[in-house]
């Protein structure tokens, strides 16, 4: 939900609440800060032992840093990997980095509906809270830092040459003044390309033993998205105290658990399956029908996959693997909230 939409919804709550003065004893308007961000809500009692709260929370935008490695899929020595990266650096005019820095940021906005139950007849400070939060399924994303753009362009350039090496197409051509196309002899480069394999970011291993390798998209970018259920139940306890003699200004502290509805998902796009067969190109496949029809280069492009790093693969290397292993442990989110409220009527 956008900010304007949130303000419109909150304005509707205020309008409905004012019109409900004949049915409720009073209404409190509160602002809060919590482990889910900042927010605002309205609270109204229903009888002597129940209070209803509704509003929204918004996680301010901030960034964390992580990175993933860039490597070749062939069974080659580290020295060969280094020399091939030098070839790509010379070709692009920029250094091909070993890692790509990522910027992680939350995209977390939620509507909430909570019911507070005051179980003690002579002590209305304590409450048990049941309710739910609702929001977009995507709660976070990771994008590559601009500093890695050159490397990502280099990865796509390399893989394009790698495909041509498998297809048997000349890597480089030029056209003279008469329109005649000439091929440029690149010597042993096609053989070396096939030997070192495709280039990309290792994303672990599929259950069948094939490797998962991510490549940049057509805009030379990589990203990941974290998703949970749109409906998130909440269970907690709270304590409310008054700050003024007229009991209009109150401070409430809540602690509870927000349930994701299972393990979070971490999705990445443009992932290819890479087998251990050095004669197989994961980016293109041989089309026998086109070959039997007499085509000279009967290769078809292979469509990349969108995978869930928390479920589809294992043995994810580096910092990405550490992050995913941590996320998989959190089927719920701990909530600590402090609310300052004012009694409107």
Image (cartoon, rainbow, N blue to C red):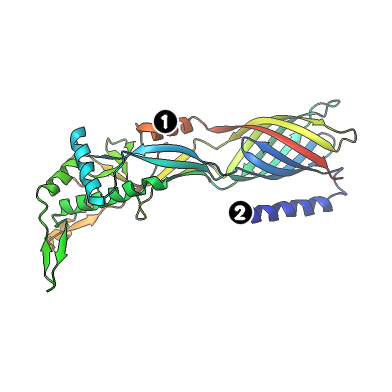
Count of number-bearing discs: 2
Question: Real-space Cα distance between discs 1 and 2?
Answer: 32 Å
Tell me the SS state at disc 2.
loop
Query: Is 101 or 265 nearer to us in this picture?
Result: 101
Q: Looking at the image, which is closer to me, 226 or 285?
A: 226
x and y, in percent, of residue 37 in the image: 63, 39
- Disc marking residue 146: none
CA neighbours of label 1 inside 10 A, class few (<14), some (14 to 19), many (20+): few
Q: Which residue is mark 1?
A: 322
What residue is rendered at 86% in x and 49% in y? 21
Image coordinates for residue 310, horizontal then vertical, percent: 42, 36
Crowding around mark 2 (Cα neighbors within 10 Å: few <14, some 14 to 19, many 20+) is few
Q: Quadrant of residue 297?
A: bottom left
Residue 197 appears in view: no
Q: Element type at marker 1? A: helix
Q: Are marks 1 and 2 in contact (CB under 8 Å)?
A: no
Quadrant of the drawing holding the C terminus: top right
**Residue 9 in the image: x percent, y percent?**
69, 53
Query: Which comes before the other along the chain, label 1 or label 2?
Result: 2
Name the residue: 80% across, 50% down.
Answer: 17
Q: Residue furthest bottom?
A: 178
Decide which of 314, 6 is in the foreground and name it.
6
Q: Residue at x 83, y 53 (%)?
A: 19
Which residue carries the number 2 mark? Answer: 2
In this picture, residue 96 sits left or right of residue 259 = left
Report x, y in % for residue 111: 65, 46
Left or right, residue 56 beside residue 316: right
On the rendered structure, is 167 left or right of 213? left
């Amino acid at each position: 939900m956008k900010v304007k939409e949130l303000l419109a919804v909150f304005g509707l709550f205020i309008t409905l609440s004012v019109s409900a003065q004949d049915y409720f004893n009073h209404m409190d308007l509160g602002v809060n800060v919590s482990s889910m961000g900042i927010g605002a809500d309205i609270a109204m009692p229903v009888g002597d032992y129940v209070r209803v709260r509704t509003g929204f929370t918004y996680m301010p935008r901030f960034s964390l840093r992580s990175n993933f490695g860039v490597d070749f899929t062939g069974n080659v020595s580290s020295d060969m990997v280094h020399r091939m990266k030098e070839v790509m650096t010379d070709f692009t005019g920029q250094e091909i980095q070993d890692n790509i820095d990522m910027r992680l940021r939350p995209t977390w906005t939620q509507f909430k509906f909570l019911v507070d139950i005051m179980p003690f007849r002579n002590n209305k400070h304590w409450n048990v809270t049941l309710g739910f939060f609702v929001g977009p399924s995507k709660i976070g994303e990771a994008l590559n830092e601009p500093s890695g753009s050159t490397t990502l362009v280099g990865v796509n350039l390399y893989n394009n040459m790698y495909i041509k090496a498998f297809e048997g197409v000349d890597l480089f051509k030029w056209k003279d003044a008469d329109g005649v196309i000439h091929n440029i002899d690149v010597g042993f480069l096609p053989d070396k390309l096939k030997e070192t394999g495709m280039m990309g970011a290792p994303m672990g291993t599929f259950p069948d033993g094939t490797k998962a390798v991510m490549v940049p998209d057509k805009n030379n970018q990589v990203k990941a998205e974290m998703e949970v259920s749109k409906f998130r139940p909440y269970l907690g306890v709270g304590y409310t105290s008054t700050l003024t003699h007229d009991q209009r200004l109150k401070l409430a502290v809540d602690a509870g658990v927000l349930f994701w509805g299972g393990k979070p998902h971490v999705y990445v796009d443009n992932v290819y399956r890479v087998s251990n067969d050095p004669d197989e190109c994961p980016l293109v496949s041989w089309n026998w029908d086109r070959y039997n029809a007499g085509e000279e280069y009967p290769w078809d492009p292979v469509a990349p996959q969108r995978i869930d790093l928390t479920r589809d693969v294992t043995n994810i290397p580096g910092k990405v693997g550490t992050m995913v292993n941590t996320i998989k442990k959190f089927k719920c989110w701990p909530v600590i909230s402090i609310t300052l409220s004012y009694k409107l009527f």
